[in-house]
């Protein structure tokens, strides 16, 4: 394993030009890139001879190395969990409202690690990076991955920092699956497991949505069998449609209705319809915008790979569908949170996990937040949700003797 | 129905200001009695656990492994802040999250009278734990009868509601409860009755405002 040094300060935006750091922010952050040369055997049987992971950390690892929290990301996010990117200050971490000094996951006391998943496209080894055997991007030949593969890849990051046991492993949605998998795969390395808006297995409907997204990409003429990178094209339309479908499932009917209703984008002089297939309604404009934006920064092969990993996740599969048996190795305490209007991973998904953990006599806390925002709620600033997470982490800090909270910032300030 | 005997195990309880409850008032007398009926180190489920004060007290003084059930957001948050395990759900939906005989004792404190599905929750309690503890206001308290004779529904400290805004939809007397318990196969092991902070030992059916029963589940007896 070799750590590549951080980019020199000169590479970052000059300090004078940077916006000031808001209270509760971890400030300006840069990723580090950790390379691992020991081969990684994947669930598929394929072997990755070496790999690199993009990693960001916030706060200080204490001398006992007992205060580390691993935050796992969902489909389209990255290692950039909190703070402002040193080179692109406008890029705020995806869970910045949750992680920072004085926030629910308090970096005054916890050392927080964000890792870009193996196979993703924000600096970790994946379809867009060079295959050392061919000297060309992996593209479609990059091996398919499972959530368990991610856990094994991430465990080496823990080893790198000398962390034997995380104070907590945490994630929402696909990140929650990773947290759950950590508790099963490396039970002695997880003190507390925080699983938000997640599931122990996708339903047929979930898989169906993923399949629609994948078909959109795979049938785009610019996909070129996955080797679009070599040919200088991007399956923009496929990626856009994939994102549009996904985006619909992240929001509740209620939120879409209140945001857009049936508002027309540019109605005729008397409010007439335009009688064509251009953008007629605001919601169409919004979805197209989201889709186009996504297609500019996200890699199509990565999207295929990540959605497939979601489909495959099913720890109970090897135990005749018995989730309690699948979870029986887990030693962690658990916090599960779901949101009433999340129809992608509805509360029943979380309840199933709670039921299995209770059956195993594990310590479990479960909050079901009555919030209108659908699946996206796990990224938003619902006060009750943040209060639960804050209270839970403060208890972890108390048990580990990390001291009392010095400040409260962000959503709960 | 035989009268329930006083409990032999009346281990002294920690005084006010016990560890874990530094800023709290001491538990009420009925909660102290409930605590005394719970074996040290056992597994306890507290239904309608509010801010988790009873469980926190039991964790501190009797080293129980506890979990609470609560529906209210603010109470769930308060329980989490205390370090109490809490499951957020509506008790009216039953206890499907919990397996058969998963706990040693299940507690339902001053909630039974406001539940729609009274029999169902009692059956569920007997399913998930060997022992159940329920407390409820005693409608047989004699001033209630006096109030009704004067033409008004009773209102007092234990039931501080008017008839039109009360959550108490299933009020009963001690004997009423004992009859239902018998029908459900619940063997009553203990009864304690109170008026305010005073324990009532004689003519309790008339003189007490709050009844606390402990019963054994038919499932527990088989085990």
Image (cartoon, grey):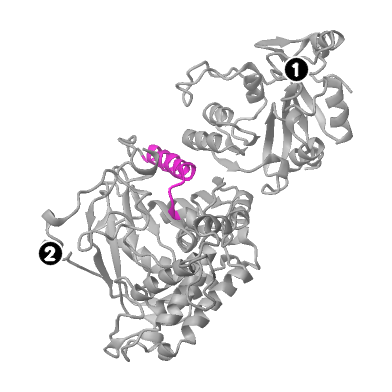
Q: Which mark is residue A8?
A: 2
Depth check, front residue: A400 or A176: A176
Mark 2 closeness class: few <14, some 14–19, many ≥20 residues within 10 Å: few
Q: Secondary structure at mark 1?
A: loop
Q: Judge left or right: residue A328 versus residue A187.
A: right
Q: Label 1 to label 2, Cα distance in Å?
A: 76 Å
Is residue A389 in the magenta section? yes
Depth check, front residue: A37 or A386: A386
Q: Which residues are magenta?
A: A379-400
Q: Judge left or right: residue A37 versus residue A356.
A: left
Outermost residue toward the front in this view = A270
* Overall secondary structure of the magenta section: helix
- Callouts 1 and 2 close, C-beta under 8 Å: no
Q: Judge left or right: residue A403 versus residue B28.
A: left
**In which quadrant will I find the N terminus of chain B?**
top right
Which residue was labeled with disc 1? Answer: B6
Q: Chain of mark 1?
A: B
**In which quadrant will I find the C terminus of chain B?**
top right
């Amino acid at each position: 394993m070799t750590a590549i040094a951080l980019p020199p300060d000169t590479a970052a935006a000059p300090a004078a030009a940077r916006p000031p750091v808001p209270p509760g922010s971890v400030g300006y952050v840069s990723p580090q890139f950790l390379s691992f040369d020991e081969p990684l055997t994947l669930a598929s049987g394929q072997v990755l001879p070496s790999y690199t992971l993009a990693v960001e950390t916030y706060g200080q690892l204490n001398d006992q190395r007992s205060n580390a929290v691993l935050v796992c990301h969902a489909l389209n996010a990255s290692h950039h969990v909190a703070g402002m990117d040193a080179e692109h200050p406008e890029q705020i971490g995806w869970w910045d409202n949750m992680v920072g000094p004085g926030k629910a996951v308090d970096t005054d006391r916890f050392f927080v690690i964000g890792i870009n998943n193996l196979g993703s496209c924000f600096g970790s080894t994946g379809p867009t990076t060079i295959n050392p055997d061919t000297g060309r991007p992996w593209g479609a030949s990059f091996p398919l991955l499972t959530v368990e593969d991610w856990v094994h890849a991430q465990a080496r990051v823990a080893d790198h920092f000398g962390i034997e046991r995380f104070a907590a492993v945490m994630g929402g949605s696909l990140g929650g699956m990773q947290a759950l998998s950590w508790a099963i795969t490396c039970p002695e390395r997880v003190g507390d497991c925080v699983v938000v808006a997640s599931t122990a297995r996708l339903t047929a409907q979930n898989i169906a949505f993923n399949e629609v997204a994948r078909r959109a990409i795979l049938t785009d003429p610019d996909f070129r069998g996955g080797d679009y990178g070599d040919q200088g094209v991007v399956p923009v339309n496929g990626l856009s449609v994939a994102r549009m479908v996904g985006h619909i499932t992240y929001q509740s009917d209620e939120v879409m209705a209140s945001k857009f209703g049936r508002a027309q984008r540019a109605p005729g002089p008397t409010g007439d319809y335009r009688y064509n297939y251009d953008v007629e309604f605001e919601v169409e404009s919004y979805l197209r915008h989201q889709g186009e934006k996504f297609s500019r920064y996200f890699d199509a092969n990565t999207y295929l790979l990540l959605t497939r990993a979601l489909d495959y996740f099913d720890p109970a599969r090897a135990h005749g569908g018995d989730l309690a048996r699948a979870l029986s190795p887990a030693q962690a305490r658990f916090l599960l949170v779901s949101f009433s209007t999340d129809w992608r991973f509805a509360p029943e998904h979380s309840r199933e996990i709670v039921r299995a953990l209770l059956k195993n006599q594990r310590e479990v806390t479960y909050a079901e937040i009555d919030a209108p925002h659908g699946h996206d709620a796990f990224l938003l600033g619902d006060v009750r949700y943040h209060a639960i997470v804050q209270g839970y982490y403060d208890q972890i800090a108390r048990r580990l003797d990390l001291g009392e909270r010095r400040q409260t910032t962000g959503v709960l300030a | 129905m035989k009268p329930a005997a006083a409990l032999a195990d009346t281990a002294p309880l920690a005084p006010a200001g016990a560890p874990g409850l530094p800023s709290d008032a001491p538990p009420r007398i009925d909660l102290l009695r409930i605590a005394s009926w719970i074996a040290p180190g056992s597994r306890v489920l507290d239904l309608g656990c509010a801010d988790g004060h009873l469980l926190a007290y039991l964790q501190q003084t009797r080293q129980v492994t506890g979990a609470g059930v609560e529906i209210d957001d603010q109470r769930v948050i308060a329980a989490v802040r205390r370090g109490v395990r809490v499951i957020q759900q509506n008790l009216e939906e039953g206890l499907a999250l919990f397996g058969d005989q998963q706990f040693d004792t299940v507690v339902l404190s001053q909630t039974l009278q406001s539940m729609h599905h009274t029999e169902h929750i009692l059956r569920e309690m007997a399913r998930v734990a060997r022992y159940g503890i329920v407390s409820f206001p005693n409608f047989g308290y004699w001033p209630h009868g006096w109030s009704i004779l004067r033409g008004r529904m009773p209102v007092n400290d234990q039931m501080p509601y008017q008839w039109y805004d009360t959550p108490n939809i299933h009020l009963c007397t001690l004997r009423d409860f004992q009859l239902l318990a018998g029908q459900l196969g619940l063997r009553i092991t203990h009864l304690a009755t109170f008026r305010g902070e005073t324990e009532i030992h004689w003519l309790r059916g008339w003189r007490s405002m709050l009844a606390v029963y402990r019963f054994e589940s038919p499932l527990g007896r088989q085990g």
